[in-house]
Image (cartoon, grey):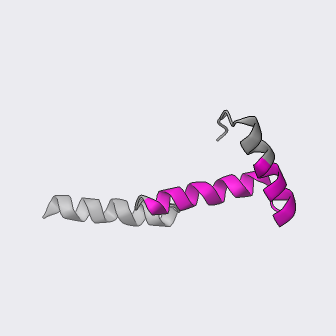
Amino acid sequence: MRKMVDIESARRTALELLASDTGKRLQDLFDEAIADLLKKHGRPTTTSEMVAASARRERKKRR
């Protein structure tokens, strides 16, 4: 899925430099940042974690 986001010029430059310094693509940096944000807020970050969380919610509903 593709989404457009607006990034401040200075931040984009900083991200491009980080990507260059670390040998990563911008997409890799965004993926890492989003995963970290989701973890910080206790949200699943992978499909298997999402399925497991959904199954736990369903089990709780049935009780």
Q: Is residue 63 magenta?
A: no
The answer to if 16 sits in the magenta stretch is yes
- SS assignment for the magenta stretch, majority: helix
Rendered-image quadrant of the C terminus? bottom left
Residue extent of the magenta highlight? 14-40
| Rendered residue at 81%/57% (across/down) | 19
Q: Nearer the viewer, residue 11 or 45?
A: 11
Looking at this rendering, what residue extends furthest in the front direction?
10
Q: Residue at x 65, y 35 (%)?
A: 5
Question: x%, y% of residue 62?
Answer: 16, 61
Of the 4 image quadrants, the one containing the N terminus is top right
The quarter holding residue 7 reads top right
Instruction: Decide if residue 44 is in sight here.
Output: no
Residue 29 vertical placement versus 10 (above, below): below
Asked if residue 16 lies left or right of residue 54, the reply is right
Identify which residue is drawn at 73% across, 57% down.
Answer: 28
